[in-house]
Image (spheres, helix red, strand yellow):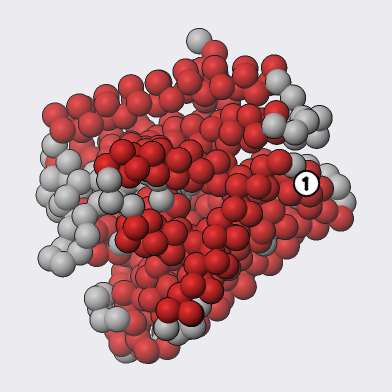
Amino acid sequence: MEWLRLFFLHPVSFYQGAAFPFAFLFNYLCIMDSFSTRARYLFLLAGGGALAVAAMGPYAVLVFTPAVCAVALLCSLAPQQVHRWTFCFQMSWQTLCHLGLHYTEYYLHEPPSVRFCITLSSLMLLTQRVTSLSLDICEGKVEAASGGIRSRSSLSEHVCKALPYFSYLLFFPALLGGSLCSFQRFQACVQGSSALYPRHSFWALSWRGLQILGLECINVAVSRMVDAGAGLTDCQQFECIYVMWTTAGLFKLTYYSHWILDDSLLHAAGFGSELGQSPGEEGYVPDADIWTLERTHRISVFARKWNQSTARWLRRLVFQHSRAWPLLQTFAFSAWWHGLHPGQVFGFLCWAVMVEADYLIHSFANEFIRSWPMRLFYRTLTWAHTQLIIAYIMLAVEVRSFSSLWLLCNSYNSVFPMVYCILLLLLVKRKHKCK
């Protein structure tokens, strides 16, 4: 079957699929209470190490090194200082690795190693976990181990106290993909006697398998449409809009499939259940909310629901701590976190402007559009416009290089974000006049 061959030819999908037997084994041993909490931490850590070496080869050291340094910082600094230092170190390390990718692609003009690309993806996820944990410690949600580490204890006791941190940063179900799991949830799932019931696991995973099957069948059909038609380099006038829409649809289908696969692996290991939810904490958030993403007529809603756990992480890390221009700072940091390729910088900054325009346009429309036929027409028009703007942003981010970005900007596709930019300027001017 072509869809199955194409899906598992993707390196990350292959390694994620290979990790399922170990996820089931871990979940089974937890249900049977077959090994201690310390053994569970070691199992997850050893699985993460083995998966990293298998998927990344020698580049795995680029993930192991910041993980060890992050744990050293977490265990040695005061809670008030831990977030600042871990954030600076982790983002500096990740940026240096991304610069290596820039050097390969733009200076040497060579395709980067697949293993190196997997390493960068894993490193970005590691940054999420490191900063999430450091924020939890800084805010008092997680008890810091710094006091115990500084005390006069043996080396083995120090290692035992740091083991949950090591295990959390490198546990195999989330090493190559998956929603961000908080440290509290991780601890609760590891220490719980029954992480996930087999019946729930079977039906939940079966449903996810059917979703992946359907998405990959559609993916094959859309791929044939894209391959049969013109590309951005040779499309003309309005044909470029169709090329943009179908190509972006292909990207979205690929993301949806991989997010569901990552989500399935977390569920198989027992980290997708409600067991780890602490009072006041939001429940498990899957990255793929396809129904909302495909039917929303608001760019701001799409921004919150696209890769949901990452959107919430960015909101907590950047948006809530920004005093001026929080929206712009959040999207600018997202471009930095993704690697600062030309297309990414343009795409994320464009997205920030589109979200700002979205707020003003819909506030104005809700004030003046009253009749339901006009509301239906307005919703249909803004849905189509939203999907086309998102397709434009997605192509800018995915093509990355300056030459491809130039082709996109010089096509008819630029009309759609320009319409929102013009409306934004008019509504901002109106808003100042009203004040």
Residue in view at x 60 percent, y 60 percent: 422
Residue 142, percent from left and from top: 26, 75
In the rendered image, which quarter is residue 372 located in? top left
In the rendered image, which quarter is residue 312 located in? bottom left
Along the viewing direction, whichever of 226 and 105 lies nearer the viewer: 226
Residue in view at x 78 percent, y 30 percent: 236
Residue 62, percent from left and from top: 61, 59
Along the viewing direction, whichever of 419 and 397 lies nearer the viewer: 419
Residue 394 placement, left or right of 367 = right
Along the viewing direction, whichever of 45 and 318 lies nearer the viewer: 318
**Residue at the top extreme of this rendering:** 1
Residue in view at x 51 percent, y 17 percent: 3
Residue in view at x 37 percent, y 89 percent: 80
Q: Mark 1 — residue?
A: 410
Residue 132, percent from left and from top: 38, 68
Is residue 48 visible in this depiction of the protein?
no
Along the viewing direction, whichever of 393 and 374 lies nearer the viewer: 374
Dot 1 falls on a residue whose secondary structure is loop
Disc 1 marks which amino acid?
A: Asn
Residue 334 placement, left or right of 344 = left
